[in-house]
Amino acid sequence: MGKNKKTRGASMQLIRIGKALSLIALLSGCASSGQNSPTARSISFDEAMAFERSLETQETPAAKSVKMLFTQPVNKSEPCKLVTTQEQLNRSNFRAYWDGQCQDGYAYGLGRDIAISDTHHAEEITIYGQDGSNANAPTVTYDFVNNSVMYSVRGNRIPEGIYYGESITNGLNGFGISYSAGKIDDQGHNLFIQSSPFSSTRVFVNTDNTIAYRFTDNSTLPVVNPTAPNFLVETLDAKTTQPGGIIIARYGNGQVRHFKLTEGQPEPVVLPQEYINVVNQKYNAVLQAQAEANTIIDRAKQVEREYLYKACNGKHSIEGLDSNTYTKICSWRDQFKEPYQQALKEYTEKLEQLKQTAQNAEQQRKIQQQIALQQRMINQQQSSQALQALGEFGQQLQQSGMQMQQYYMNQPPPPVVPLTSPGNNQINCVTAGVVTNCRY
């Protein structure tokens, strides 16, 4: 059981990368001019890859070999070594039970490992081989304290394997379920998808020990704000989960923008096709891993069905373990049926409200577009009318000028007044005292 818990621990640690969605608010207002914005500069492949290459230079701890540890089930009198971990052995009042056969001193065949202490309760349905190992065997692990189930098929080396996880939260913050499905190799290269029945957001992650490519897809959500991103591509530091390097955003209106993070600030850029090809390869690898996981995990679900058919028929029990604890695995999920249905109802109602809001917003956008179009037509019509009136006024002025010119041309010339003065040009002067007056 220890190897699978180790696998799950590594998987869940990387899954948390998908939960820490970064909020880059500046992206929501950058869709007006599209990818080919005048402010966006073209960058080279080397500049686009600078963040990833800086992370590749960091030292990563070498993979440690894990020694297999065993414990003796308390319900078995014969030697029957059962796989465990040091972490479990250190727990207060730890005890293990094995609901299955023993062979050559080891737990063997299909069965259930039950590990209980004062602080934890974990169970695992699996198939053990002759050496007490369940490598390459389908496994279903229940954690009743943390409300999680992990379906997996382990590889030969830890943490290699295919997995499908279900994590349930049910507390003051409400009810929630998250699913994760993926593939991890022996070097810790993890490809997985995270989703929830109560959210339209899906997160695709392609990560190793240094670099993570995260694809956040919210494209199935109704578009209320067409300038808000509904698909986001980010590169992250796998150790800190902090984004850096390149961001690609696709918006509700279909536009795509590229950004380069410089000291935490997104700068509009135009990426080379070579880098976009790298991103597409990372994304397609996650999709392929999901398809592979869905096929292989069916083996684990089949093993679960077969064991539960045996354990939950009311005819079996384990010596030293009370019936409620033994059969908890049979009815554990029943406690979540009602809150699940309530949460699903609330989500469906919110989704319908959002769809209505999106429809109203789309109608308003169409109305505004029609108003703007009508206003442009009115403005064009008014401009055309003004030009027409100005032309008519000019024609009237021209006609009036021509009429005035014709009028003056048709008038007889004025009489010419002779410049000779009457009186035969003689001047008569009369003197009265000191004043003399002269006239013609």
Image: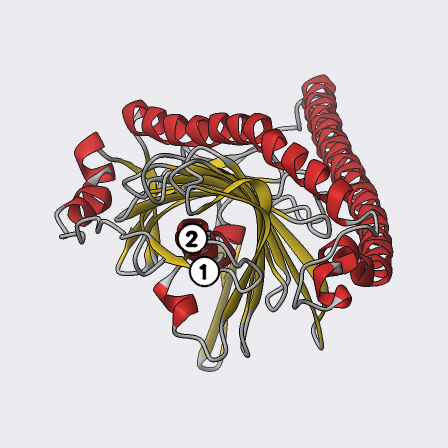
> Of the residues shown, which amino acid type is indicated by label 2?
Lys
In the image, residue 290 lies at what x, y percent? 53, 31
Task: Using the image, tell me which numbered label, if any, was put on residue 81.
Answer: 2
For the residues bearing labels 1 and 2, Cβ distance under 8 angstroms:
yes
In the image, residue 142 lies at what x, y percent? 60, 55
The residue tagged 1 is 72
Q: In the rendered view, would you say 229 is above or below 402? A: below
In the image, residue 234 lies at what x, y percent? 40, 45
> Of the residues shown, which amino acid type is indicated by label 1?
Gln
Q: Residues within 10 Å of mark 1 (few under 14, many from 20)?
A: many
Which residue does the image show at 25% across and 38% down from the upper left?
Answer: 48
Q: Residues within 10 Å of mark 2 (few under 14, many from 20)?
A: many
Using the rendered image of the protein, determine whether residue 423 is visible from the camera's viewpoint. Answer: no
Left or right, 331 with reference to 290? right
Q: Earlier in the sequence, mark 1 or mark 2?
A: 1
Left or right, 26 with reference to 308? left
Q: Nearer the viewer, residue 304 or 176?
A: 304
- Residue 85: quarter of image: bottom left
Q: In the rendered view, would you say 127 is above or below 225? A: above
Give the SS element for disc 1: loop
Give the SS element for disc 2: loop
Which residue does the image show at 66% across and 28% down from the upper left?
Answer: 415
Q: Nearer the viewer, residue 194 or 403?
A: 194
